[in-house]
Image: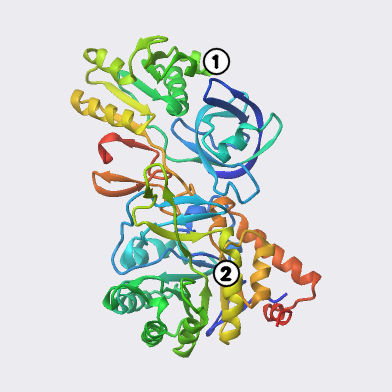
Amino acid sequence: MKQFVSRVIKNSVINEHFLEMEFEWNTTQVPSPGQFLTIRVSEKTVPLLRRPFAFSSFDSQNKSCSIIYQKRGEATEALSQKRAGEKIDIIGPVGNGFPRFEGKEALLVAGGIGLGPILFLSDSFRKSGVPTTLIFGCRSKNLKPVSPSFERENPVICTDDGSEGFHGTTMDYLNSISQKTGPGSALFCCGPHPMLRACHNFSTKHQIPCYVSVEQVMACGVGACMGCVVKTVDPPGFKRACKEGPVFRSFELEW
Amino acid sequence: MNLGIEIGKKVLPNPVGVASGTFGYGSEYEKLIDLSRLGAIYTKAVTLKPRPGNDIPRIIETPAGILNSIGLANVGVELFLKEKVPYLEKLPCALIANVAGSTPDEYCEVISRLEASDSIWGYEINISCPNVKHGGMAFGTDPVQTGKLTNSLRGLSSRPLILKLSPNVTDITVIAKAAQDNGADAVSCINTLVGMVIDTKNKRPVLPMKTGGLSGPAIRPVGVAMTYKVSRAVSIPVIGMGGIFSADDAIQYLLAGASAIQVGTANFIDPGTASRVLDGIVQYAEIHKIERISDFHSFLD
C-alpha cells in the first residue's frame, strides 16, 4: 500500500451510467483482483473524504490500472471531469482481494457497478487457465458496457427487460444452469446487496463456496477508524470492509 | 525553535500529535508515513472490556466534515497491552493512551492496569462518555463529575494526565477549571460536536444511534474559539484540535493559546498532514522569530 500521485491516461463513458478510467501505475505493488484504491478527488473540503474504487484491471506492460465507476455525487462527478494527463492522488492497493482458485469452474456474477472487480478477476482466471463464466446483469441493453476489457471476457449478458442476451436477472440465469454446477464450482460475486444475498442462498442450496465483494462508506480506508465494518455471523461481530475485506466468504456475513 | 512541550513531568518531542480514533493503534499507517515525525500518538480509546462498537452505518460525510458513531470499538485494555503496545512502544513519539469508561471505577481500573506498562507516556481521558452511575450524563458536561474523576485518576498515576474536553457544554472553561483544580496536567479540546443527519427519503436518521460526533474542517472555528477561552481560564497547557488540515490551521490554535495540537480527521484524507503541519509550524516560527511554543501566546489578548 502506498500513497502517490498518478496521472489519468483515459477517462471515458462506457454506457449511460458508467465510466472507465485508466491511470498510470508506477509503483511495484501489484494490485490483485478484489483489491481497491482510494482517490482524493479534490483539494477542497467538499467533497471531503477519499472515495474507494475497486481495480477493474492491471496492465503490467502498460504500467496502468483501471477502475469502473458511476456518477453518484459530487466526488464521482468531479472524477468524471478529469482528463488525460491530469493528476490523481491515490492510496492503494488496499483490501484482501479474491483468493486463489484451483477448482473446476468459476462462476463470476456481476451486477451493475459491481462489474469492475469481477472483470479483473475474470481476466486473471482466464489467463491462468481457470474455466470461467462471467455473468453480467443490468436493466436494459443500453446499460451494457461498451469496452474492450468487457468484451474480451465473453460475458453472458442478462437484461431485466430482455433487450439483449438472457431475459432475466443474473440469478435467473444462474438458476437455469444450476444442474451444471457441482463440487469444484465456486461463485465470485459483486453487485447490489440483494444480488449478493441471492448468490449466497444459491451457494448454500447447491453446496458450493461463494465469495462476495462488498461496498461500504469509508473514512480512512486503511483499517484505522473502524467506520467501514460489515456485520458478521460466523463469528458474530464486525469486520472491516477495507482490511478483512472487501472480499468475504458469504457464509461469514449477516444477510 | 525549541519543539519540546512540557506536560506534567514529561516533555513531548514536538507539538504535533494524531488524535484518538483516527489513527487506530499506529501500525495501520506505517506503510504510508514516517511515524517517527509524530510528537504523540493518542491511541484509540481503551476501555476495560473489549467493545465491538455500534451498529452500521457508523459514518457519514457532512459538508466539510464527518459524523461518526463508531461506539468506542476497541480491543479492551488486556489485548491493548498484549498486542498493541509492543508495536507502539518501538516508536519514538509519546504513546498516550486515550481512556474511556462508563463508570469512574472503569476508568480507574484501566489506568491501574496501564500503569504496569513502562511504555505508556501518559493518559488522555475521554470524558464525553455517559456516566451510567449518574443517569447517563456525560462526565464532561458536569464539573463535579469531571473533578471527582480527575482526582481519582490523579491518585493512581504520576504520568501526564490530560482531560479531553467536550464542546457540548454551556461553558467549557468551567469544566477545564475543574480538571485543573483536581490535578490534571493538561486539557485537550475539542472532542466532537453532537450532530445529526436525517435521510429524507426514508425519513430516518442515517446513524442507528441517531446522533453522532461531528469532526473535520467544519468544526475548526469552534475548536479555535474554545481553545482561546480555555487557555485564558487555566494555567495548565491546552492541546488544541478540531479540523486541523494545514499548518495554518494549527497555527490558529497555537495563537489562540494551545501549546500542542492534534491532527484527526485530516489523517483520513491525507495521512501526510501531521508531518506537513510540523514543517509548517517550524517555518512560520522562523519567519516570525518565534523560539518556543509559549511565544505564540503573546500575540492575542
**Place of residue B288 in the rendered image (x, y in percent of width and height, measured from the top left):** 79, 73
**Place of residue A182 in the rendered image (x, y in percent of width and height, measured from the top left):** 22, 18
Label 2: chain? B
**Place of residue B137 in the rendered image (x, y in percent of width and height, measured from the top left):** 34, 74
Q: Amino acid at mark 2?
A: Gly
Residue B92 lies, with reference to residue B175, above or below; the image says: above
Horizontal placement of A186 versus A137: left or right?
Answer: left
Q: Which residue was labeled with disc 2?
A: B223
Q: Which residue was labeled with disc 1?
A: A148
Q: Which residue is found at the position 42% from the left and 59% from the top?
A: B212
Tag 1, which secondary structure? helix
Q: Amino acid at mark 1?
A: Pro
Residue A24 lies, with reference to residue A138, above or below; the image says: below
Q: Extreme bottom residue here?
A: B181
Horizontal placement of A119 versus B282: left or right?
Answer: left
Mark 2 crowd level (few <14, some 14–19, many ≥20, 10 Å Cα): many
Q: Which residue is found at the position 78% from the left and 70% from the top?
A: B286
Choose between A11 and A36: the one closer to the eye.
A11
> Mark number for residue A209?
none
**Place of residue B211 in the rendered image (x, y in percent of width and height, measured from the top left):** 40, 59
Circles 2 and 1: CB atoms closer than 8 Å: no
Question: Residue A191 appears in which quarter of the rendering?
Answer: top left
Q: Is residue B143 visible?
A: yes
